[in-house]
């Protein structure tokens, strides 16, 4: 289970930050808690909408992808701090990531009441129209006299307090499961994904119908996109747009780019007959939301893949395609892309047939494939079976010497076991599981 923690204070030295860090570290065996930073969130101003700014979108995505939220609030004049109020304002105006999201409130204060009035204030805000969070009832955690509560290592001193916090957190985890099951999100992290691309990111091109067959041409005109012999400075090179197209279209793999808003915005091999592609694409699909480039049966699996990459549960998803056989082994790879600051910026998908590579390797090393009698995994489908697993063993010509280096090409036997993976839709490459 994945939770995010929000601390209502932007002070450098904050006991509520200390409390949230303690929860994340001390109870890491119970749950994964990622503490979000709200320091750079601007003061809410509806006349200067910054909903699509990287700072606000970062919080929006993290909260949407999480199973639940823990908020630690100080008490300022009987209410929550202005910084926390501003965060919730941004996330309840045009964006609504808290909607139906389970939330647990904790708080620490210098005095005996342990931020009780601020917690009551926060509960009222979270349950208001536009926010619509589902706040855990009862089991309030109010840490009083906070200056004496922590030791020099940042740990709570009192074991009874730690145990009560553990009990409260455990109940919240049960609460999260119940609420997410009622909302249809249990065991389906992809439910948090907007596969119809109804939101925006800072690279979204406004004013063009995503589903237009000529989206590329319309979008290019809208932003005055460069083309032809115009030079583009890259991280480590300068190429014209023509050179970029030649370079990408000549890749021996099929490439697809889906942005952070789940919009399909690029694929290479523009001149390729879709029927001849491993993952068929056609020009008119570019610009569509991901929901429209996957069959309905594959959409749930595709959303789960996207969510795993967006939330950092994994950085790479690998899937073999059903129907692989002795002369083909098609693979789909989905790699999360990030900007210089580490923010998620979309997915690089590439599709490749591994068999020509394996075949060349066998021919040049003099090895062959034989069944593995101890096999537990199908080499073709990746599913557990009694079928053969690919094992390489030296063949008759394995002692052949490389003409260039003079080194022997003889190699030790290497076992290659296909991992168990979800079934993949043969058209889109999205998992159906």
Image (cartoon, helix red, strand yellow):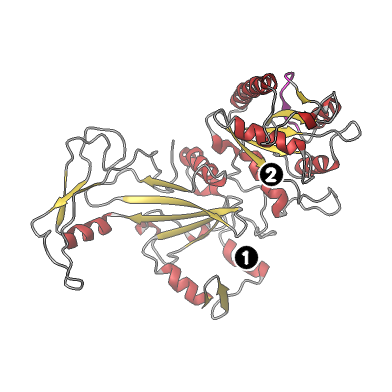
- At horizontal 72% and vertical 31% (from top left) the residue drawn is 150
Q: Which residue is mark 1?
A: 218
Which marked residue is nearer to the observer: mark 1 or mark 2?
Answer: 2
Give the CA distance from mark 1 to mark 2: 29 Å
Q: Is residue 142 above or below residue 264?
A: above
In the displayed orientation, state which residue is furthest to the right.
77
Residue 187 x %, y %: 52, 30
In the displayed orientation, state which residue is furthest to the front.
152
Residue 432 x %, y %: 43, 38
Q: Which corner quadrant of the image does residue 189 belong to?
A: top right
**Is residue 134 located in the magenta-colored stretch of the structure?**
yes
> Can residue 259 be seen from the camera position used here?
no
Q: What span is colored magenta in the figure?
A: 132-139
Q: Tell whether 89 sits left or right of 176.
A: right
Residue 67 x %, y %: 61, 33
Q: Is residue 45 above or below residue 272?
A: above
- At horizontal 48% and vertical 71% (from top left) the residue drawn is 245
Foreground residue among 290 and 51: 51
> Can residue 369 be seen from the camera position used here?
yes
Q: Is residue 186 above or below residue 323?
A: above
Residue 225 x %, y %: 62, 71
Q: Tell whether 397 sits left or right of 390.
A: left
Q: Earlier in the sequence, mark 1 or mark 2?
A: 2
Q: Which residue is mark 2?
A: 60
Secondary structure mostly taken by the magenta-highlighted segment of the chain: loop
Q: Is residue 72 above or below residue 346?
A: above
Foreground residue among 32 and 251: 32
């Amino acid at each position: 289970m994945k939770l995010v923690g929000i601390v209502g204070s932007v002070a450098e030295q904050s006991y509520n930050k200390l409390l949230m860090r303690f929860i994340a570290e001390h109870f890491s065996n119970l749950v994964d808690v990622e503490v979000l930073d709200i320091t750079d969130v601007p003061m809410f101003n509806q006349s200067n909408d910054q909903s699509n700014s990287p700072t606000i979108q970062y919080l929006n995505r993290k909260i949407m992808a999480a199973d639940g939220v823990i908020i630690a609030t100080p008490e300022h004049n009987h209410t929550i701090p202005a910084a926390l109020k501003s965060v919730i304002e941004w996330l309840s105006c045009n964006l609504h990531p808290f909607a139906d999201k389970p939330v647990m409130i904790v708080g620490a204060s210098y005095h005996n009441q342990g931020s009780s009035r601020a917690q009551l204030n926060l509960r009222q805000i979270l349950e208001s129209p536009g926010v619509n969070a589902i706040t855990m009832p009862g089991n309030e955690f109010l840490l009083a006299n906070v200056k004496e509560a922590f030791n020099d290592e940042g740990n709570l001193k009192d074991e009874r307090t730690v145990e009560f916090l553990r009990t409260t957190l455990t109940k919240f985890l049960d609460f999260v499961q119940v609420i997410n099951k009622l909302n249809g999100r249990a065991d389906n992290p992809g439910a948090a994904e907007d596969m119809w691309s109804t939101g925006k990111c800072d690279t979204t091109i406004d004013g063009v119908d995503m589903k237009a067959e000529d989206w590329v041409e319309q979008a290019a005109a809208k932003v005055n996109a460069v083309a032809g012999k115009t030079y583009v400075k890259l991280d480590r090179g300068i190429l014209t747009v023509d050179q970029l197209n030649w370079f990408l279209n000549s890749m021996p793999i099929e490439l697809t780019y889906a942005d952070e808003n789940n919009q399909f915005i690029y694929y290479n091999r523009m001149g390729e007959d879709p029927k001849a592609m491993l993952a068929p694409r056609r020009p008119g699909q570019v610009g569509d939301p991901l929901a429209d480039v996957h069959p309905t049966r594959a959409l749930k699996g595709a959303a789960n893949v996207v969510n795993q990459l967006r939330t950092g549960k994994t950085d790479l998803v690998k899937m073999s395609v059903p129907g692989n056989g002795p002369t083909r082994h098609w693979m789909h790879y989905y790699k999360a892309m990030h900007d210089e600051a580490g923010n998620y910026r979309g997915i690089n998908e590439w599709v490749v047939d591994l068999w020509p590579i394996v075949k060349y390797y066998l021919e040049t090393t003099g090895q062959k494939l034989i069944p593995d009698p101890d096999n537990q995994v199908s080499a073709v489908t990746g599913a557990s079976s009694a079928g053969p697993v690919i094992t390489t063993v030296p063949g008759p010509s394995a002692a052949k010497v490389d003409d260039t280096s003079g080194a022997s090409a003889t190699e030790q036997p290497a076992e290659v076991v296909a991992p168990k993976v979800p079934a993949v839709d043969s058209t889109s490459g999205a998992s159906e599981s």
